[in-house]
Image (cartoon, rainbow, N blue to C red):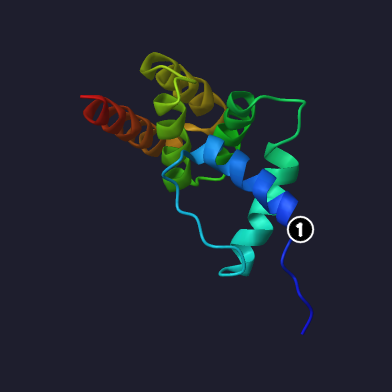
């Protein structure tokens, strides 16, 4: 069977960016343990998130909009909480983003957007104490 593990340099670069995106305490598998994770590190984080054209906070704003539009509220909550923890956004900015998104995504998603944003804010505040 062919070795599908990514180049160790790409994986290491991806792991560095992954930790910047999700925090030092984010779940990490050892190289070769989970093929999907290795591929995600090398490609998504090493090659896409790690590109120089946009900062991580800018990329996160794009992702927040995409996740909201796709009704991926659980992952959206993870991104909002990380943005708060990393001081990329304030609670007030999170609320403004949700107001902006509701106008484009639709009121049918408004209660879910509100719930996930307020949960992220409450978690952030509770952990900051």
Vertical placement of residue 68 versus 94, above or below = below
- Which is more toward the observer, 68 or 129? 129
Q: Is residue 68 visible?
A: no
Number of numbered labels in the structure image: 1
Vertical placement of residue 61 versus 89, above or below = below
4 relative to 103 in the view: left or right? right
Quarter-of-image position of residue 67: top right
Q: Is residue 128 visible?
A: yes
| Residue drawn where x is 71% and y is 67% of the image | 5
- Tell me the quadrant of the picture where the N terminus can be found: bottom right
Q: Position of residue 37 (x, y in %)?
A: 59, 60
Quarter-of-image position of residue 39: bottom right
31 relative to 79 in the view: left or right? right
Residue that carries the numbered disc 1 in the rendered image: 7
Q: Position of residue 124 (x, y in %)?
A: 31, 29
Quarter-of-image position of residue 96: top left
| Residue drawn where x is 54% and y is 62% of the image | 30
| Residue drawn where x is 42% and y is 47% of the image | 74
Q: Residues within 10 Å of mark 1 (few under 14, many from 20)?
A: few
| Residue drawn where x is 58% and y is 31% of the image | 60
Q: Secondary structure at mark 1?
A: loop
- Tell me the quadrant of the picture where the C terminus can be found: top left
- Which is more toward the observer, 51 or 81? 51
Q: Position of residue 21 (x, y in %)?
A: 54, 37
Vertical placement of residue 108 versus 39, above or below = above
């Amino acid at each position: 069977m062919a070795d599908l593990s990514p180049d160790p340099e790409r994986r290491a670069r991806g792991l560095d960016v992954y930790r910047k995106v999700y925090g030092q305490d984010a779940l990490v598998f050892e190289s070769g343990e989970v093929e999907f994770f290795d591929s995600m590190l090398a490609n998504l984080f090493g090659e896409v998130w790690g590109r120089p054209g946009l900062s991580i906070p800018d990329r996160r704003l794009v992702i927040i909009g995409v996740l909201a539009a796709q009704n991926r509220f659980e992952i959206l909550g993870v991104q909002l909480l990380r943005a708060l923890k990393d001081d990329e956004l304030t609670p007030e900015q999170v609320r403004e983003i949700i107001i902006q998104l509701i106008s484009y995504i639709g009121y049918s998603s408004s209660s879910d957007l509100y719930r996930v944003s307020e949960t992220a804010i409450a978690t952030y505040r509770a952990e900051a104490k």
